[in-house]
Image (spheres, rainbow, N blue to C red):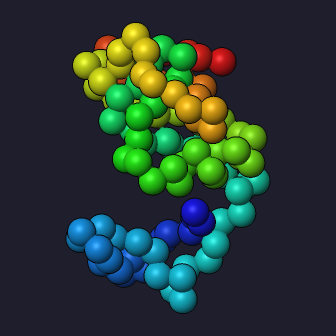
Amino acid sequence: MTFYYLTEWDQLEKVYFGLEEPRPEKTEMCPPDEIELLLVPGLIFDRNGFRIGFGGGYYDRYLKDYSNSTVSLAYQFQVVENVPTETFDLPVEAIITDEQIVKVK
């Protein structure tokens, strides 16, 4: 997974399922060490910072070598006691909901 600097909407192109992704020829790659805070998506989270994502494992592979801060945004109903985890799953440092901030680390 690669992140890019985005300054204008026309730097995006529609790909599969109507998603929009950066057009590499119109953008510049952002090195991982320049990303100070990474927003990590997910469907369900637990109070230990683990999450169930969208099944691709992209963020788990990226987080393995990422050392700066991580946070997820969710509604309170998306935070549960425990989610199933695998050995490669890495938690986020905090989950910000519409009702509270769950600090993990």
Q: Which residue is drawn at 45% across and 53% down?
A: 56
Side of 55 relative to 33 (left or right): left
* Residue 49 against residue 89 in the figure, above or below: above
Tag count: 0
> Residue 86 at x, y = what percent?
56, 32
Q: Which of 14 and 58 is in front in this view?
A: 58
Side of 69 relative to 43 (left or right): right
Q: Which of 38 and 5 is in front in this view?
A: 38
Q: Can residue 100 be seen in this snapshot?
A: no
* Residue 17 against residue 38 in the figure, above or below: below
| View extreme (bottom): residue | 25
Would you identify the image quadrant in which residue 93 lies?
A: top right
Q: Can residue 10 be seen in this snapshot?
A: yes
Quarter in which the N terminus is drawn: bottom right
Would you identify the image quadrant in which residue 28 lies?
A: bottom right
> Residue 23 at x, y = what percent?
47, 82
| View extreme (top): residue | 81
Q: Residue at x 35, y 19 (%)?
A: 79
Q: Nearer the viewer, residue 49 or 89?
A: 89
Quarter in which the C terminus is drawn: top right
* Residue 26 against residue 71 in the figure, above or below: below
Q: Which residue is drawn at 41% across and 41% down?
A: 53
> Residue 82 at x, y = what percent?
43, 15
> Residue 14 at x, y = what percent?
30, 78
Side of 62 relative to 49 (left or right): right
Q: Which residue is drawn at 42% across and 22% down?
A: 83
